[in-house]
Image (cartoon, rainbow, N blue to C red):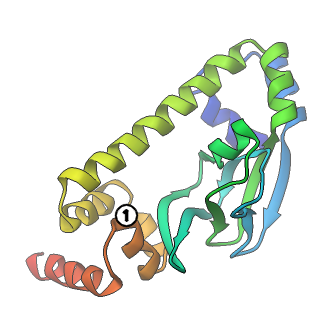
Amino acid sequence: MTEQFFTFTDKIVNFTKANKELLATALSFRQVTTKTELVSYNKRTDELYFLLKGCLRKYYVKDGEQITIYITAENSFIGAFDSFVTGTPSKETIETLEPTELLVLNKKDLTRLYKEIPLMNEFVRKILEQTLIQFQQALTSFILDSPEERYTKLLSQNPQILQRVPQHMLATYLGITATSLSRIRKRILEKS
C-alpha cells in the first residue's frame, strides 16, 4: 500500500529509505464504503488523506443545496486544510463517491515528521503549492470561462471523472444546473 504512495512522493522529493520507513509508520490504512464522510461539516479534523483507490468530492452546503467544489481520484491528497491547520470546525464536507482506500496522516504525526524528516517540510510545501495552483486555476476558470468551456476542460483534463461522478454533482462543480449540463453534453456530442 505504501509502495503506491512512495511512487507518488518520488516524483516530488527524494526521501531516503530510512525516511520512507519512518514515514510509513505514521501512515494508517483505511478502507471505506461509498458515501462515507471523511470530514463532516462543522466538525474539526486532524487528518489528511492520500487516495490510493476511489473517488472523492469536497462540497459546501448553501440553502440546503450541496455545491461540489473539488473532485479527485487516485494518487492525490485531500483534506479540509483550514480545519486541519487552525483546529476550527470545517465548513466543508469530504465524501467518498466509490468504495475507497486511503492512507491517513494525522496532525500530531505530521508535526513529529517535520522534526524527524526535514525533507517533509519541502514535500508538504510542494503539495500545498500544487493545491493552491489547482484552486487558482479553478477560480480563474469560473471567472473567465463559459460553462461549456469549463466542461470541455474537464473532459480533456480528467475524462474518467465524468464516468465516476453523478451528473448533478458535476453540474454544481461546473457552476450550472443538471439541465444545463445535459444541454452542453448534447451540443458537444452533436459537434463530434
Give the farthest residue toward the front: 63
Can I make out residue 24 in this image? no
Q: Is residue 23 above or below residue 102?
A: above
Identify the amino acid type marked 1. Pro
Above or below, 79 against 58 in this view is: above
As helix, strand or loop, the secondary structure at mark 1 comes to: helix
User: In the rendered view, would you say 50 is above or below 146?
Assistant: above
Tell me where residue 186 appears, x and y as whole percent: 19, 84
Instruction: Tell me if 150 is positioned left or right of 110 in this view.
Output: left
Residue 118's place in the image compared with 95, above or below, is: above
Quarter the C terminus occupies: bottom left
Q: Would you call the spot at circle 1 few (<14 residues within 10 Å), some (14-19), or many (20 or more)? A: few
Q: On the image, which quarter does residue 147 sit in? A: bottom left
Residue 6 or 28: which is nearer the viewer?
28
Work out whether residue 54 or residue 62 is closer to the camera in this orientation and state it.
62
Residue at the image point whose x is 82% and y is 40% from the top: 106
Residue 23: quadrant of the picture: top right
Res. 169 visible in picture: yes
How far across and how far down the image is residue 27, in percent?
84, 40
Q: Give residue 101's position: percent from left, percent from top.
A: 74, 59
Q: Residue at x 78, y 19 (%)?
A: 114
- Residue at figure coordinates x 72%, y 67% from the top left: 37
Residue beneath disc 1: 159
Q: How many numbered marks does the figure carry? A: 1
Nearer to us in this view, 158 or 48:
48
Instruction: Name, please, the residue furthest toward the right.
Output: 25
Instruction: Tell whether 22 sits left or right of 172.
Output: right
Query: Which residue corresponds to the image point at 77% horizontal and 48% vertical from the top-left?
Result: 103
Q: Answer left or right for 37 relative to 64.
A: right
